[in-house]
Image: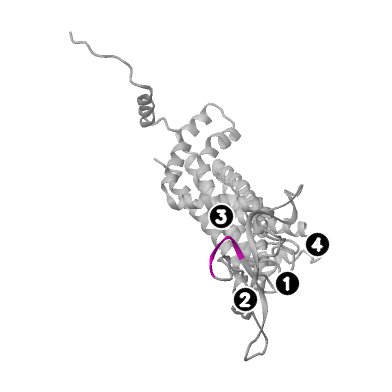
Amino acid sequence: MLAFDSAPPPPHEETVKGQQNGNESYLSLVWRRLRRSWTGMMGLVLVGLLLLMAVFADFFAPMDPKATDTGFAPPQMVSFRDKEGSLTYPPRVYALGESEELDPVTFQPIVGPDYDNPRMLGFFVKGADYKLFGLIPANRHFFGSVDGQPVHFLGTDKFGRDVLSRAIIGSRISLTIALTVVFIVTVIGTTVGMVSGYFGGAFDAWVQRFVEIVLAFPQLPLYLALTSLIPVTAPTNVFLAFVIVVMSALGWAQMSREVRGKTLALARIDYVRAAMAVGATDRRIIFQHIFPNVMSHVIVAVTLHIPSVVLLESFLGFLGFAVKPPLISWGLMLQDTANYSVIGTYPWILAPVGFVLVTVFAFNALGDGLRDAVDPY
């Protein structure tokens, strides 16, 4: 008889074979597919940076968003050259100043960079006082001038307030509104959609008629009508809460319709019918058998719904129906762009548009990547 070597394979070979035999978890498969999508990973990184900026907005803002300076001051460019044109470090900015020379046409002093008084830049510098998370006193900022002098990387608005600092602080309100609205919409829409699709029959018919009524409302006129009901003297927190409630009340119906369609298909699968046969309660079947299988669709829908809420808040804020001062949001900042002559003369006040575009692109890219990754088989 022939003798065969029955020595066990090395441990690393068993691990490789185990992964090749399909022992990888579902989340691992989704992550592996998502990493292959460069747009999805770009969206994930941008979303992470946006959320980090919103949480630590006071730290990342180089100046106090309420501090005033010269109105409509142009952006100050970062320079690595000194007055003589030689390369230098650290980087610096040159504030605008009036020279002794006069314009030959207007006979006004010529305004230009003040090369004699540069403002050095640095990281983790001292600046305006703030409270981190509203509790911890601090005065360190991620970047800014070393000596605490005002710098305006994106210029100032008509009141002389720093546009970049206000846009960073405004991300907190804009993203809070979007995330809160999407959370409420997801909870209500997912619950109503699963319950309606699972029970079916007359209950499903009546629920869907109500959903169709909500979807039939012209949303923009209704937004304007409902938000105008709050008096101007109402507290900002009350106004903000009312805006969130209105957006949520009109946004859950579409999510409910999508989840209902998924539930109708899942309710006929064998393991759901087996759970019914063994006497499982309806609540257990809905939340332990159906809910995990609709989560992939819900996650993708959430990432694609957040940009629409950000755009809606910006549009309503531009019209003056979303956020009221002293709160700051991207939509409220865009009210300064209502005059075409102002845009042509001071184009840097359109900077909040860039933040909105980056946010919309980030969440859309992440949603597209997740949509391809949630079905890795």
Mark 4 crowdedness (10 Å alpha carbons): few <14, some 14-19, many ≥20: few
Q: Please state the horizontal and vertical placement of residue 282, each as a whole percent of the image.
A: 59, 34
For the residues marked 2 and 4, what is the alpha-carbon distance in whole angstroms?
33 Å
Residue identifier under label 2: 346
Q: Quadrant of residue 104?
A: bottom right
In the rendered structure, find residue 159 and report the number of the disc placed on it: 1
Q: Amino acid at mark 4?
A: Ala
Mark 3 crowdedness (10 Å alpha carbons): few <14, some 14-19, many ≥20: many
Q: Amino acid at mark 2?
A: Tyr
Query: Nearer the N terminus, badge 1 or badge 2?
Result: 1
Residue identifier under label 4: 234
Label 2: which secondary element: loop
Q: Amino acid at mark 1?
A: Phe
Nearest to the observer: residue 181 or residue 158: 158
The quadrant of the image that shows the C terminus is: top left
* For residue 82, above or below residue 204: below
Q: Amino acid at mark 3?
A: His
